[in-house]
């Protein structure tokens, strides 16, 4: 687990100050080592950095002020092969192929055996070297064979190509800036903003989707000309003519297991989850399981013990999480595993509030408890934490999914929308409900965020009139059943939102989150099952519940679904400091003339609906985001 950065200047050599500052901006992603590779005038050179290990500094000169057309930067969080043999950028024996890689490849041992049979030899036990040799053997088809999470950059001098790739469901982030000057990429946007080509500018199209979905839909970001690499894709840049091509290397399989019994499906899911855990528990550093008290993470903890008898579990406690904390403790005792509870007090949650919000590089609608979870793991010496994230998307876990059948019926009455003339809040909500024509609209409504009409009335007309409000480019297959909804959940709820937030939260404290539910085999298997088996419209996660039944205490199985998130609404109502903080931030925002001040005041002073606070918090985090990334 690491951080990568790099650039390719199309027309001239530029100063290595760029890559040094980019790498420093993501130091938190990898404090254990750093490295650089520069290419100029048809020659490549490796360098160490100020944070490199002593052995690496003895091997390569420390990068000072050099000029180059291409530069690769790397920050290392040592997890597999802790020796200097895992150092990056890593070069092939003939120095014609150079790789930087952020992530973990769980099937690297099997791939290594296959490559050894094909005649390749290895100098390290790292998964990075396996990817490098696998690319030499299989070319771009290697990406489909990798089971794990990854953001990869490969420079292939022999074929004059530069390649960027991201894993199937986007567990590892990869952002890039593109212009006529060149291409710049990194694990986090804050690194891109250190490059001389990149001048921060608001992308209002990205802000618009952020307000509607609680996250910016990839490939857009909230910055102009900065894009999020789409999951399951790779981008190739021809070094001879700078031509850029993009390709997908995987897509969700269609239903192919129509005659399978539910009993067999449950048995196979249990088996595949065990296989995933056996691979993901592998590390040369201590591993912990973060338990929220619900089914997903508790099942991970239960099934981890046979593979690691010393597995450690912990739970984050915050206001109104008493039942989850109780269940997590009960489950840990039931499994016989060590367990700790980290209580996040009101004061601790507010202590670094502004800094934590600004760390996320876009407006956000919540306090992120996972930052506290990552800090606790870091303080306890755990570099790797297993997470239950991904189970909700894969197994139909969200409560709003249960409204799908009702929506499919009610959408037949969407013709009444033009006949709703009243302007009160209730009427507007009804009108919004009958505006959901496509599965994409139903997915948007389920995110509990701003409605399109609210975003319109909020935004300055001069800005709004230039926003592309037709979001059809984000539509997927849009089938009118659960399979259509599943695609949106996996691409936008998971890839653009949850694992992206996870990565930023964890890496702020140099911790790696792993996701046993998101192995290649498990995703492929579940995706190919009949949809009536995966989703019944009555109970969330029906298949996973059945698989968990023989592992978990009944109290955990019967627990209603609840998200792992801090109760922001509670703070807004209870804490005077927070209310003053919000009021002060909104006053600053109103002066910018981006938004209608009267609408902001109306939303702040008249919170009636259960989720009215979400819109307020989106505006607060927008202002803090703007302060961080646009004010000098």
Image (tube, rainbow, N blue to C red):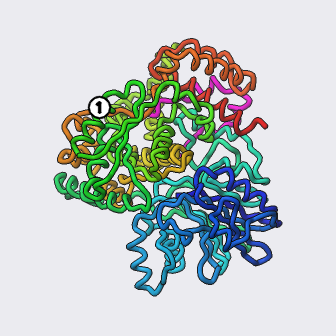
Where is mark 1, residue-wise?
Answer: 326
Given residues 241 and 356, the one toward you in this image is 356
Q: How many marks?
A: 1
| Residue 205 in picture, x, y percent from top left | 64, 40
Residues 131 and 304: in front is 304
The answer, for residue 532, to whether it is visible in the render is no
> Percent position (x, y) of residue 259?
20, 58
Q: Which residues are magenta?
A: 447-474
Q: Residue furthest bottom?
A: 119
Q: Residues within 10 Å of mark 1 (few under 14, many from 20)?
A: some
Give coordinates of residue 45: x percent, y percent.
Answer: 72, 74
Residue occupying image coordinates x 44% and y 58%: 285
The C terminus lies in quadrant: top right
> Relative to 45, is 28 on the left or the right?
left
- Choose between 621 and 598: the one closer to the eye: 621
Q: Is residue 315 magenta?
A: no
Q: Residue 255 appears in which quarter of the rendering?
A: bottom left
- In the image, taking residue 182 as reference, residue 299 lies left or right, namely left
Asked if residue 461 lies in the magenta stretch, the reply is yes
Q: Picture quarter containing residue 324?
A: top left
Q: Secondary structure at mark 1?
A: helix
Out of 470 and 224, give the one closest to the viewer: 224
The residue positioned 54% from the left and 74% from the top of the image is 132
Q: Is residue 614 above or below residue 199?
A: above
- Would you say 134 lies left or right of 224 here? left
Percent coordinates x, y for residue 127 in the rendering: 48, 69
Residue drawn where x is 33% and y is 51% of the image: 311
Q: Can residue 376 be seen?
A: yes
């Amino acid at each position: 687990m690491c951080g990568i950065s790099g650039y390719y200047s199309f027309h001239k050599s530029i100063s290595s100050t760029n890559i040094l500052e980019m790498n420093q901006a993501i130091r938190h992603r990898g404090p254990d080592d750093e490295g650089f590779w520069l290419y100029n005038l048809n020659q490549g050179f490796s360098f160490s950095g100020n944070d490199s290990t002593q052995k690496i500094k003895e091997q390569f000169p420390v990068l000072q002020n050099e000029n180059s057309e291409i530069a690769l930067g790397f920050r290392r969080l040592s997890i597999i092969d802790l020796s200097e043999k895992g150092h990056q950028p890593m070069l092939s024996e003939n120095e014609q192929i150079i790789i930087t890689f952020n992530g973990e490849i769980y099937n690297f041992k099997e791939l290594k055996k296959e490559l050894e049979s094909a005649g390749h030899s290895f100098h390290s036990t790292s998964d990075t070297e396996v990817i490098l040799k696998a690319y030499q053997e299989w070319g771009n088809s290697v990406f489909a064979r990798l089971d794990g999470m990854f953001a990869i950059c490969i420079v292939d001098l022999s074929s004059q190509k530069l390649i960027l790739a991201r894993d199937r469901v986007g567990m590892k982030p990869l952002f890039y800036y593109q212009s006529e000057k060149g291409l710049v990429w990194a694990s986090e946007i804050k690194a891109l903003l250190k490059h001389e080509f990149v001048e921060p500018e608001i992308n209002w199209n990205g802000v618009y989707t952020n307000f509607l979905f609680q996250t910016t839909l990839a490939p857009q970001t909230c910055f102009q000309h900065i894009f999020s690499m789409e999951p399951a894709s790779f981008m190739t840049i021809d070094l001879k003519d700078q031509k850029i091509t993009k390709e997908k290397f995987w897509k969700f399989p269609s239903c192919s297991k129509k005659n399978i019994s539910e009993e067999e499906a449950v048995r196979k899911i249990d088996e595949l989850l065990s296989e995933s855990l056996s691979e993901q528990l592998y590390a040369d550093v201590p591993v912990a399981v973060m338990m929220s008290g619900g089914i997903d993470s508790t099942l991970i903890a239960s099934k981890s013990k046979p593979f690691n008898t010393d597995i450690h579990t912990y739970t984050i406690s915050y206001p109104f999480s008493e039942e989850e904390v109780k269940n997590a403790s009960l489950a840990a005792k039931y499994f016989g595993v060590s367990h700790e509870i980290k209580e996040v007090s009101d004061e601790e949650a507010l202590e670094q509030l502004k800094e934590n919000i600004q760390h996320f590089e876009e407006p956000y609608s919540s306090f992120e408890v996972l930052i506290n979870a990552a800090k606790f793991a870091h303080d306890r010496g755990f570099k790797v934490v297993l997470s239950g994230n991904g189970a909700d998307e894969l197994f139909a876990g969200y409560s709003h999914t249960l409204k799908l059948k009702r929506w499919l019926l009610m959408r037949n009455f969407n013709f009444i929308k033009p006949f709703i003339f009243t302007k009160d809040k209730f009427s507007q909500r009804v009108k919004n409900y009958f505006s959901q024509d496509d599965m994409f609209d139903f997915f948007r409504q389920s995110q509990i965020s701003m409605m399109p009409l609210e975003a319109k009335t909020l935004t300055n007309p001069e800005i709004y009139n230039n926003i592309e409000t037709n979001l059809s480019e984000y539509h997927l297959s849009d089938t009118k059943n659960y399979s259509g909804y599943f695609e949106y959940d996996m691409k936008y709820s998971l890839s653009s939102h949850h694992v992206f937030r996870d990565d930023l939260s964890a890496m702020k404290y140099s911790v790696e989150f792993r996701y046993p539910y998101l192995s290649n085999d498990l995703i492929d298997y579940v995706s190919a099952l009949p949809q009536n088996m995966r989703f019944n419209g009555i109970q969330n996660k029906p298949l996973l519940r059945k698989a968990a039944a023989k592992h978990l205490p009944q109290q955990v199985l019967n627990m209603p679904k609840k998200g792992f998130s801090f109760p922001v609404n509670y703070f807004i109502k209870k804490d005077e400091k927070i209310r003053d903080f919000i009021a002060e931030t909104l006053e600053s925002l109103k002066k910018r003339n981006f938004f209608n001040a009267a609408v902001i005041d109306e939303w702040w002073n008249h919170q009636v609906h259960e989720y009215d606070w979400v819109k307020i918090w989106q505006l607060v985090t927008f202002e803090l985001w703007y302060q961080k990334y646009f004010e000098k």
